[in-house]
Image (spheres, rainbow, N blue to C red):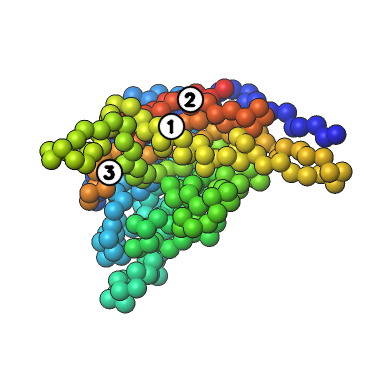
Amino acid sequence: MSINPPPTYRAKPLRIGCVQYDVKLGRVDENAAKVQAMTAGLAPGALDLLVLPEMALSGYVFASPAAIAPYLEAPKTGPTARLATALAARLRCYVVAGYPEIIPDAKISKEVEAEALGVGYNSAVLAGPEGVIGNYRKTFRFETDKTWARAGDGFTYFDLPEPLGRVCIGICMDLNPRDFIAPWDAFELATFAVDNAVDVLVVPMNWLDPGEQDDSDEDEDGGLEVPRRDPNVPSESNLNYWAARLAPLHDPTPRYSEGGVVEPAPGKDVVFVAANRVGKEEGTLFVGTSCVMAISSMPSRIELVEVCNRTEERVLIAEVA
């Protein structure tokens, strides 16, 4: 009979911040100044990790390679990398921030526009107090990404000092089944986290409002129901969906030993960080609900440590023991 591995315990609590705000399309300097202002009250050493949304300074909805071309950034020297390194240095923590990464040799032409060939990557920079230390490129593209971005070459992780440990970065659509056609139970990103003993799974997002109907009114003609959502609460359907997509972390599939004994898959405590944005961009409404969850598989448990509502702009602060 095998003995399950003991749960992991941190020597000190893990302190996480998420900047949830209304990113303004194309206003890079304005967005950077707003992030600086929102984080100005954080004391150096108060956080271990600060996370900004997907494409945090550029905005997200770009219809073509030409539209996004002015906002493509170099991984280590672009506006997002500069902001992330400045925040990391001032706060003495690690920072993850999404940005549109430039492909230096990609040329924008009529052929590129016609074929929607990728001129960049939807990426996230990882910075520490000493500067940029990592970069991740989104593996599973959403339809909006496919107008301009190439797919990354797979999930990865970064080993950081305690209390962070092994950190995996995914970006928004990475949490879904590939192209929404892969089997639901492939759980690609969560399975990667389990198989690689990840301690923290960080997901910058531009997650859309799912159009859930918490309550409803009749329209003016007295017929169809019109959704009415409370902006002052989180999206419960989103929280439940993200938890469901993380099933391998809290409800692992049994595996079989040579002796035929059913054993639970190896598991450990994992912290999930979703950093989403709010507001509307080019007619697309984003759902906020940035959150930190503490997840355990033995016993199976999900704790919602902290969460934002659908519309508020604030720096979420969470502490995980």
Question: Which residue occupies 63% across, 42% down?
Answer: 194
Label 2 – label 3 distance at C-alpha: 25 Å
Q: Residue furthest front?
A: 223
Q: How many marks?
A: 3
Label 1 – label 3 distance at C-alpha: 18 Å
Q: Amino acid at mark 2?
A: Val
Position of 165 relative to 185 (above/below) = above
- Tag 1 and tag 2, C-beta contact below 8 Å: yes
Relative depth, front residue between 135 and 139: 139
Residue pointed to by mark 3 = 285
Q: Which is more foreground, mark 2 or mark 3?
A: 3
Q: Earlier in the sequence, mark 1 or mark 2?
A: 1
Q: Amino acid at mark 3?
A: Leu
Position of 177 relative to 104 (above/below) = above
Label 1 – label 2 distance at C-alpha: 8 Å
* Left or right: where 78 falls relative to 228: right
* Left or right: where 179 falls relative to 280: right
Q: Please provide percent x and percent y for residue 38.
A: 30, 30
Q: Amino acid at mark 1?
A: Cys
Q: Please provide percent x and percent y for residue 201.
A: 53, 40
* Residue 291 marker: 1
Relative depth, front residue between 53 and 269: 269
